[in-house]
């Protein structure tokens, strides 16, 4: 008899987006002429930078010629891309990261899930609440948790609340934890971590022999030079942190697929006999065995992000989304809502008016303004009473949606 991995049956999420679709469809049936604007999606809307497109077209031509054709590439990514990543994203910011520590992949989402392959099954795991659901669900799938509880949490995980009361700065865990997922700039709240906050985490991890899994997918949206882009800007972080990066949000590669993970050579975890095991060796082995690299064409596209033209074009893309975020902030505030985030991130985290739940605000925005966002409760129980609005959209949609909210929603 074949047994299934019944850990999957513990998963409760996957409920959020179907429920949003159900409510939107019910509304459409009653209001067939309503022009619904979706500000709920975590996907980019603007086309790829031309520098990336040109590089990929050139790479396609190379593939069509026997003399310049490429078959399997290195599982870790081509050296020319890893060197540009190390130099530009790390060394230029004073981080001691070498090309050999960069592993190119087809996504930060898969890397944040796959990374569990190199850790034992009895670590205590901490996540923030609210949280990017991938961190939680992949631990549920791996059997690292108990069942889901009433309030949407899982037994066995340590939840660190992030809310207006603590200025969206998760507290250090009160019990000992081994793996800590942090995402800054944060999805869904748009919050950032200062150098001071990250230093506190790095010190905690070093003192407690813990490892930080740092997701910096939104680092390009940081506009204040004092805010760290990488956890490796903090002294000692190469001894306690793995960092995930992606070309999805800075260069619009959500449908093109390229990302990378940094595993420092000196990073270790404990073997069964208490000895130090180099995590670089394990990740390198894991990738070489289960992954065959990102396509040559796409890696050439990612490389073009680091050209002068590419840098200018991604800056324009990010500025465009940040301007959307600014418009959303201003208009929602004008409508009387309290808004967080949206300054160093493409997400705005809106406080539901007093007495309103996340879903109440969802229904109100849908009915009065025909605007769809994401209920904060879908990202964890501490997200209840909040609402996520994404700045990934056309200017016209943002302006129309905000005008409707200002005109029809008074709280
Ligand atoms: C979008 C996003 C990513 C990027 O995922 P890809 O698989 O590289 O597209 C990673 N982390 C968070 C929190 C995200 O929102």
Image (cartoon, rainbow, N blue to C red):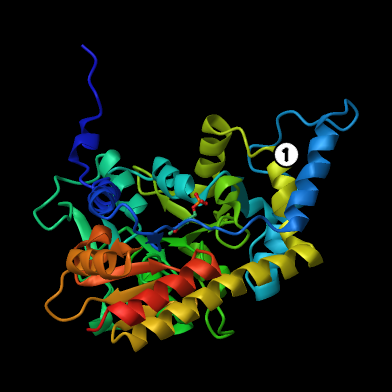
- Asked if ligand 1 lies within 8 A of label 1, the reply is no
Q: Position of residue 63 (x, y in %)?
A: 81, 32
Q: Can residue 300 be seen?
A: yes
Q: Position of residue 296 (x, y in %)?
A: 72, 39
Residue under pointer 1: 296
Residue 5: quarter of image: top left
In the image shown, does 257 or 368 lie closer to the viewer? Answer: 368
In the image shown, does 371 or 205 lie closer to the viewer? Answer: 371
In the image shown, does 267 or 253 lie closer to the viewer? Answer: 253
Residue extending farthest front: 33
Q: Position of residue 160 (x, y in %)?
A: 25, 68
- The residue located at (37%, 59%) in the rendering is 36
Question: Where is the N terminus found, in terms of image quarters?
Answer: top left
Give the answer, above or below, for where 144 lies relative to 374: above
- The residue located at (70%, 46%) in the rendering is 299
Residue 291: quarter of image: top right
């Amino acid at each position: 008899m074949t047994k299934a991995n019944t850990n999957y049956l513990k998963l409760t999420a996957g409920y959020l987006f179907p429920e949003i679709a159900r409510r939107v469809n019910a509304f459409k049936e009653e209001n067939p002429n309503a022009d619904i604007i979706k500000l709920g999606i975590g996907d980019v809307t603007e086309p790829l930078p031309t520098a990336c497109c040109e590089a990929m077209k050139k790479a396609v031509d190379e593939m069509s010629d026997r003399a310049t054709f490429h078959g399997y590439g290195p599982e870790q990514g081509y050296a020319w891309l890893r060197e540009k990543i190390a130099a530009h994203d790390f060394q230029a910011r004073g981080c001691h990261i070498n090309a050999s520590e960069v592993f190119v992949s087809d996504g930060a989402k898969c890397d944040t899930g796959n990374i569990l392959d190199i850790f034992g099954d009895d670590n205590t795991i901490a996540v923030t609440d609210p949280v990017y659901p991938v961190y939680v669900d992949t631990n549920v799938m791996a059997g690292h948790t108990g069942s889901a509880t009433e309030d949407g949490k899982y037994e066995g995980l340590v939840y660190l609340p992030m809310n207006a009361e603590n200025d969206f700065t998760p507290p250090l865990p009160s019990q000992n934890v081994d793996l800590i997922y942090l995402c800054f700039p944060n999805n869904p709240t748009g919050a950032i971590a200062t150098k001071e906050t990250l230093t506190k985490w790095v010190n905690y991890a070093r003192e407690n022999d813990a490892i930080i899994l740092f997701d910096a997918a939104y680092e390009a949206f940081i506009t204040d030079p004092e805010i760290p882009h990488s956890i490796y800007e903090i002294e000692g972080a190469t001894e306690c942190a793995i960092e995930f990066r992606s070309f999805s949000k800075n260069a619009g590669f959500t449908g093109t697929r390229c990302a990378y993970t940094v595993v420092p050579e000196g990073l270790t975890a404990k073997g069964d006999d208490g000895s130090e095991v180099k995590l670089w060796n394990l990740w390198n082995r894991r990738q070489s065995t289960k992954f065959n690299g990102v396509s040559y064409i796409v890696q050439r596209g990612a490389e073009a992000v680091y050209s002068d033209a590419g840098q200018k074009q991604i800056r324009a893309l990010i500025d465009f989304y940040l301007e959307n975020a600014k418009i959303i902030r201003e208009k929602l505030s004008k409508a009387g809502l309290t808004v967080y985030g949206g300054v160093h991130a493409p997400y705005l985290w809106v406080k539901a008016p007093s007495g309103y739940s996340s879903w109440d605000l969802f229904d109100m925005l849908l009915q009065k303004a025909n605007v769809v966002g994401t209920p904060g409760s879908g990202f964890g129980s501490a997200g209840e009473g909040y609402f996520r609005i994404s700045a990934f959209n056309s200017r016209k949609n943002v302006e129309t949606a905000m005008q409707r909210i200002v005109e029809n929603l008074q709280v």
